[in-house]
Image (cartoon, helix red, strand yellow):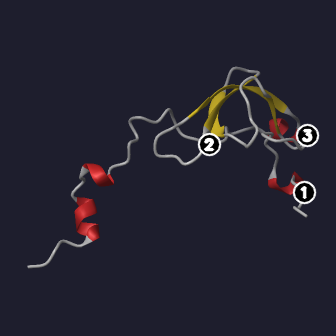
């Protein structure tokens, strides 16, 4: 008699293989934005930086001017109270969120 293979042990649903999703604050993602918001600038403020179990990076809670809030990975040098800009016209600064086409190539 041999051992059970790893896939069979995972399927059993033991605590070692379960994700601690009940501890998380919410999904870490960008907000869906309209075409007008993407072409302009939307500003928000970093309300808190936190550790989320199961993730390898700190997470920032960002609240936008219109009251919407979302979680995003914190950039290096980000701090509580920092003003974040999102959109195509946002400045190139640490923490700001730009479309991929607007980010310059690294030298």
Residue occupying image coordinates x 78% and y 27%: 82
Q: Is residue 81 left or right of residue 11?
A: right
Report, in whole angstroms, how far the alpha carbon at label 1 lies from the one at label 3.
12 Å
- Provide the secondary structure element on which disc 3 rests: loop
- Tell me residue 16's x, y (percent): 29, 52
Image mark for residue 29: 2
Report, in whole angstroms, how far the alpha carbon at label 2 lies from the one at label 3.
21 Å
- Tell me residue 59's x, y (percent): 61, 37
Location of mark 3 (residue): 91
Residue occupying image coordinates x 88% and y 52%: 102
- Dot placed on the residue nearer the N-terminal end, 2 or 3: 2
- Provide the secondary structure element on which disc 1 rests: loop
Location of mark 1 (residue): 104
Q: Is residue 94 left or right of residue 54?
A: right
Of residue 66 and residue 107, the one placed in the foreground of this image is: 107
- Provide the secondary structure element on which disc 2 rests: loop
Measured along the vertical axis of the image, is residue 64 above or below residue 23?
Answer: above
- Tell me residue 78's x, y (percent): 74, 35
Q: Is residue 95 left or right of residue 90?
A: left
Say whether marks 2 and 3 touch (CB < 8 Å). Answer: no
Badge 1 density bin: few <14, some 14–19, many ≥20, Cα 10 Å: few
Q: Is residue 3 left or right of residue 30?
A: left
Measured along the vertical axis of the image, is residue 76 above or below residue 62?
Answer: below
Badge 2 density bin: few <14, some 14–19, many ≥20, Cα 10 Å: few
Residue occupying image coordinates x 18% and y 71%: 4
Image quarter of the N terminus: bottom left
């Amino acid at each position: 008699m041999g051992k059970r293979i790893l896939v069979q042990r995972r399927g059993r649903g033991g605590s070692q293989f379960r994700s601690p999703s009940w501890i998380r604050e919410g999904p870490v993602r960008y907000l869906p934005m309209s075409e007008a918001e993407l072409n302009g600038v939307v500003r928000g403020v970093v309300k808190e930086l936190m550790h989320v179990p199961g993730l390898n990076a700190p997470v920032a809670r960002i609240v936008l001017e219109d009251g919407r809030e979302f979680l995003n990975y914190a950039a290096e040098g980000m701090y509580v109270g920092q003003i974040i800009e999102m959109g195509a016209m946002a400045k190139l600064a640490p923490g700001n969120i730009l479309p991929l086409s607007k980010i310059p190539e690294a030298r």
